[in-house]
Image: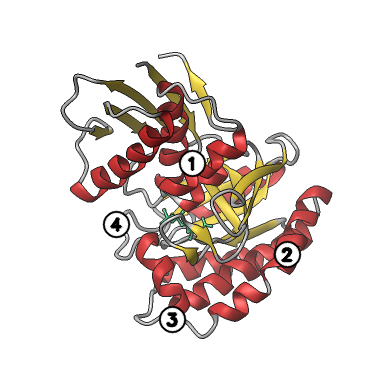
Amino acid sequence: MKKATAIAHPNIAFIKYWGDKDPDLRIPVNGSLSMNLDNLYSRTTVEFDPGFKRDELTIGGRVPVDIAIQRVAQFLDYVRHLAGFSAYARVTSENNFPTGSGIASSASGFAALSLAASAAAGLDLDQPALSRLARRGSGSACRSVPGGFVEWKAGQDDETSYAFSIAAFDYWDLHDCIAIVSKEHKETGSVAGHILAGSSLLQDARVADTQRRLDLCRQAILKRDFHAFANIVELDSNLMHAVMMTSQPQLYYWRPATLAVMQSVIEWRTEGMPVCFTIDAGPNVHVITTGEYSSAVVAKLNRIPGVIEVLVSHPGKEARLIED
Ligand code: DP6
């Protein structure tokens, strides 16, 4: 039995994952596309030992709530099943971004956990297999396994649903300027949100059009065409939030400052700046621009009332093992 440590970055989805065909295996209703965020990461150490009495988990030095421990224990059960042993594990995880900053840690957390746990268990998984494993912990985590710009092929079942890189981290110098407008913990997390997605009349229309949006977004990235990229990224984010707002019960993630940032971004683009917004299941706004304009965008964002802080990230690499 061994010990292994891995780091992985969170990712921001340009074409969003919202709703599952199979919630247990996290097979999504639609494919999605994202960019890893280099400046943010989770670092996770896993140690299996036949002497341990149960799985133990700390995140940032603290024992998390029971539901988080159960989710990790269930995930480790699957790793043990693959490896063919029953020893419990000690899992120590840290994020370099504060929990509750509105940045989801489940993608980077489960990507790092997949790599560290599989390595510690002696499993030698290739990247698609690792991505499939991470998907079982958190859907978007499968996109944090490969590097740079990443597409998740929805697939039909466990074998066909995984993510792969479409361009390396240094292919396009895009920056994500994350405008934090609230640090409160979100009321409805994505686990519950994915279940509610099908209750919106708009979900079928959103899903039916996804392949077109994926193709346009992939092409825009490969051509480094910011104008085409901005149009499709904002449309996709708006479609997902329209589904959220028309779910039963309705999910409203936006705050007044969220909308203020969105409107400013549209205005700046009209004035000629390469800038667009995208929003996940929370009120904070990911403002995407090119490296050249990044500091100007941060300065403008900081002047909007309600913006507490701006975090900047460029495209990040794949999940990787590191020395302890
Ligand atoms: C809005 O991957 O966080 O960020 O599988 O339940 O952990 P779980 O869901 P998660 O859902 C991500 C939703 C999203 C869009 C996206 O990242 O594609």
> Which residue is drawn at the image coordinates 54% and 36% (left, top)?
130
In the picture of the structure, the residue carrying the numbered disc 4 is 184
Instruction: Report the mark closest to the observer, 2 or 1.
Output: 1
Q: Position of residue 205 (x, y in %)?
A: 62, 80
In space, the residues marked 2 and 3 are separated at their CA atoms by: 39 Å
> Which residue is drawn at the image coordinates 80% and 55% (left, top)?
219
**Between disc 1 and disc 3, whose residue precedes?**
1
In the picture of the structure, the residue carrying the numbered disc 3 is 199
In space, the residues marked 1 and 3 are separated at their CA atoms by: 28 Å
Residue 293 appearing in the image: yes
Around disc 2, counting alpha carbons within 10 Å, would you say few (fewer than 14), some (14 to 19), or many (20 or more)?
Answer: few
In the picture of the structure, the residue carrying the numbered disc 2 is 271
**Between disc 2 and disc 1, whose residue precedes?**
1
Rendered view: 59 above or below 208: above
**Three-letter amino acid code at disc 4?**
Glu
Farthest residue toward the top?
323
